[in-house]
């Protein structure tokens, strides 16, 4: 198969993807939960595994701080901060797993200062004297 | 890994077509970055507050970036590998962005 054919094939797949699901279950619109199992907190999904809700931002890069779709960008901004706040930025399944998506959407100094402060608090709350975070099991991710 | 990615994302946007220095960093907070790899094989070195940004091209190609100084006139670029020869940037694809062609192994300095 030629590169042109591959490109056309993948472009077709890309063009056929459905839009990201959002929910209006709360006043601010957020990305809808993707895994209705475990410690689900509707409509914020599984806050202890925040990646399942923020994959379009990280590692997906489909939504960035420069996205022109302001509705989608706002929804994912609210989602990342809602998940982070709910888990106090130290979700049990991956201490730092909520951090990349939130940081990648930051576009001003107030946001980055707030995030750095939240990260600092999360580490202070979990770090043992040997700098290993206590998360009740599991390890760093 | 998540922690490192988060901090790096605040310091630079390096994986899109247009590299952006300090996209969300508080300029009063000191930071020093050396050899951060950006898309296209470019190595970035800069500080916060921003004075100059150095870009080393490892494979040649065009370097496209948002003007970190956000000034009315284009930033000054010199090729440090040729004794400081001036490099004239061209306007980039979006407002406030610029681009210039690089040569493999050369280091460039961007200043206001």
Image (spheres, rainbow, N blue to C red):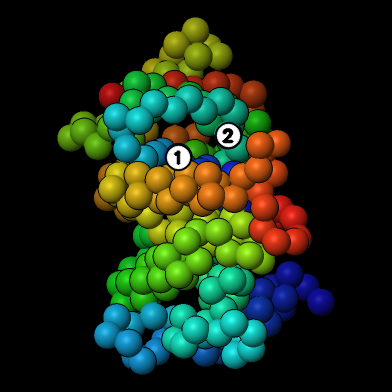
- Image quadrant where residue A141 sits: bottom right
For residue A61, say whether it is visible: no
Residue lying at 21% horizontally and 33% vertically, measured from the top left? B71
Element under disc 2: strand
Q: Residues within 10 Å of mark 2 (few under 14, many from 20)?
A: some
Extreme residue in the left direction: B72
Label 1 to label 2: alpha-carbon separation: 10 Å
Residue that badge 1 annotates? B11
- Image quadrant where residue A23 sits: bottom left
Q: x, y percentage for residue A70? A: 30, 72
* Residue nearest the viewer, comparing B88 with B22: B22
Extreme residue in the top direction: B83
Of pointers 1 and 2, the one earlier in the residue sequence? 1
Q: In the shown orientation, is residue B80 left or right of residue A72?
A: right
Residue that badge 2 annotates? B36
- Label pair 1/2, CB-CB below 8 angstroms: yes
* Residue nearest the viewer, comparing A69 with A117: A117
Whether labels 1 and 2 share one chain: yes
Give the answer, above or below, for where B102 lies relative to A89: above
Q: x, y percentage for residue B74? A: 27, 32
Residue lying at 41% horizontally and 38% vertically, measured from the top left? B21
For residue A122, say whether it is visible: yes
Give the answer, above or below, for where B29 lies relative to A6: above
Residue lying at 43% horizontally and 51% vertically, measured from the top left? A118
* Residue nearest the viewer, comparing B111 with A141: A141
Element under disc 1: helix
Q: x, y percentage for residue A115? A: 41, 51
Extreme residue in the right direction: A1
Q: Residues within 10 Å of mark 1 (few under 14, many from 20)?
A: many
> Which numbered disc covers residue A18?
none
Q: In the shown orientation, is residue A119 left or right of residue B75?
A: right
Residue lying at 48% horizontally and 25% vertically, measured from the top left? B32
């Amino acid at each position: 198969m030629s590169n042109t054919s591959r490109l056309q094939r993948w472009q077709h797949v890309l063009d056929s993807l459905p839009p990201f699901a959002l929910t209006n279950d709360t006043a601010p619109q957020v990305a809808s939960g993707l895994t209705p199992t475990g410690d689900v907190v509707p409509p914020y999904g599984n806050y202890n595994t925040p990646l399942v809700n923020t994959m379009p931002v990280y590692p997906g890069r489909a939504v960035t701080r420069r996205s022109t779709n302001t509705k989608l960008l706002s929804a994912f901004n609210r989602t990342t901060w809602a998940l982070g706040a709910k888990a106090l930025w130290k979700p049990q399944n991956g201490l730092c797993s909520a951090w990349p998506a939130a940081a990648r959407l930051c576009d001003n100094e107030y946001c980055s200062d707030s995030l750095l402060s939240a990260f600092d608090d999360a580490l202070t709350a979990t770090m043992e004297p040997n700098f290993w975070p206590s998360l009740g099991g599991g390890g760093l991710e | 890994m998540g922690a490192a990615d988060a901090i790096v994302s605040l310091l630079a946007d390096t994986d899109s077509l247009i590299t952006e220095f300090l996209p969300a960093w508080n300029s009063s907070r000191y930071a020093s970055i050396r050899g951060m790899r950006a898309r296209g094989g470019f190595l970035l070195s800069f500080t916060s507050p921003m004075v100059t940004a150095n870009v080393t091209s490892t494979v040649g190609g065009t370097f496209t970036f948002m003007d970190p100084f956000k000034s009315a006139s284009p930033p000054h670029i010199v090729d440090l590998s040729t004794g400081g020869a001036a490099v004239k940037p061209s306007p980039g694809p979006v407002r406030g962005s610029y681009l210039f062609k690089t040569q493999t192994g050369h280091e460039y300095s961007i200043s206001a």
